[in-house]
């Protein structure tokens, strides 16, 4: 919860990947709050009051996952909304002549996005979701200490650069500091 709060303010892309990881952590622990408390909350170096708040956060996420029918797969609406907001910003940046570096980063990433979608990514989902799924997939491979090919590393670097740039613009946009015209 504390990490998510910080990430949401500083790097929306990392926030989204973190929240997907939390969804998977909850699933991996069978939605069992006692397991989550023992594995995640109890070792967390915060006060008992903060642990109560963290427990409530996990309980709320579990309830939301249940209510929204994403117990086996999929993402919470709050996380899907983040993709929607970022996609909207992404499209506004591409339409504006004031952001040529962003457009260049997008067109550099586009062949990788097309390739990912051709390999089975859901063609109805936003391109940015495909990017996040690629980033998340590589994150999971690295956590499992599995090999990531050189070609995949190259693609992830380009996609990561695009998402990092978008995350920076997201913060500026939230502050009302972007001028698209």
Image (cartoon, grey):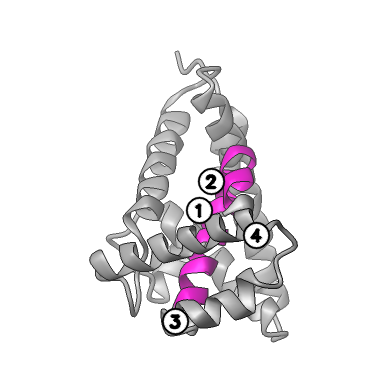
Q: Are marks 1 and 2 in contact (CB under 8 Å)?
A: yes
Q: CA distance from mark 2 to mark 3?
A: 44 Å
Image spot of residue 72 (x, y percent): 34, 80
Compared to residue 138, the image places residue 181 above or below, namely: above
Is the residue marked by circle 4 packed among few (<14), some (14-19), or many (20+) residues within 10 Å? Answer: few
Q: Are marks 2 and 3 in contact (CB under 8 Å)?
A: no
Q: Which residue is mark 2?
A: 107
Q: CA distance from mark 2 to mark 4?
A: 49 Å
Q: Which residue is mark 3?
A: 32
Q: Which residue is mark 1?
A: 110
Is the residue marked by circle 2 packed among few (<14), some (14-19), or many (20+) residues within 10 Å? Answer: some
Q: Which residue is mark 4?
A: 48
In front here: 154 or 35? 35
Image spot of residue 61 (x, y percent): 40, 62
For image coordinates 45% across by 38% down, the residue present is 90
Image spot of residue 5 (x, y percent): 58, 46
The mark closer to the camera, 2 or 3, is 3
Instruction: Point out the tag, 2 or 3, that comes first from the N-terminus.
Output: 3
User: What SS does tag 3 mark?
Assistant: loop
Instruction: Point out the tag, 4 or 1, that comes first from the N-terminus.
Output: 4
For image coordinates 54% across by 76% down, the residue present is 36
User: What SS does tag 2 mark?
Assistant: helix
In front here: 18 or 35? 35
> Which quadrant: the C terminus?
top left
Magenta-highlighted residues: 4-26
Q: CA distance from mark 4 to mark 3?
A: 20 Å
Inspect this view and state whether residue 113 appears: no
Q: How would you classify the magenta stretch by its main secondary structure? A: helix
- The disc at residue 160 is none
């Amino acid at each position: 919860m504390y990490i998510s709060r910080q990430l949401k303010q500083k790097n929306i892309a990392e926030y989204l990947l973190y929240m997907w990881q939390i969804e998977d952590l909850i699933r991996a622990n069978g939605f069992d709050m006692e397991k989550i408390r023992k594995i995640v909350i109890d070792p967390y170096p915060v006060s008992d009051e903060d642990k109560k708040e963290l427990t409530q956060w996990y309980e709320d996420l579990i309830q939301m996952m249940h209510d929204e029918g994403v117990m086996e797969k999929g993402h919470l609406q709050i996380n899907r909304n983040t993709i929607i907001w970022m996609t909207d910003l992404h499209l506004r940046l591409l339409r504006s002549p004031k952001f040529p570096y962003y457009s260049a980063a997008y067109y550099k990433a586009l062949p990788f996005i097309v390739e990912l979608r051709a390999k089975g990514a859901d063609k109805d989902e936003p391109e940015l979701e495909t990017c996040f799924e690629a980033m998340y997939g590589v994150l999971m491979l690295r956590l499992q200490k599995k090999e990531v090919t050189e070609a995949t590393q190259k693609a992830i670097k380009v996609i990561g650069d695009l998402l990092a740039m978008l995350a920076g613009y997201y913060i500026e946009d939230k502050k009302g500091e972007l001028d698209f015209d």
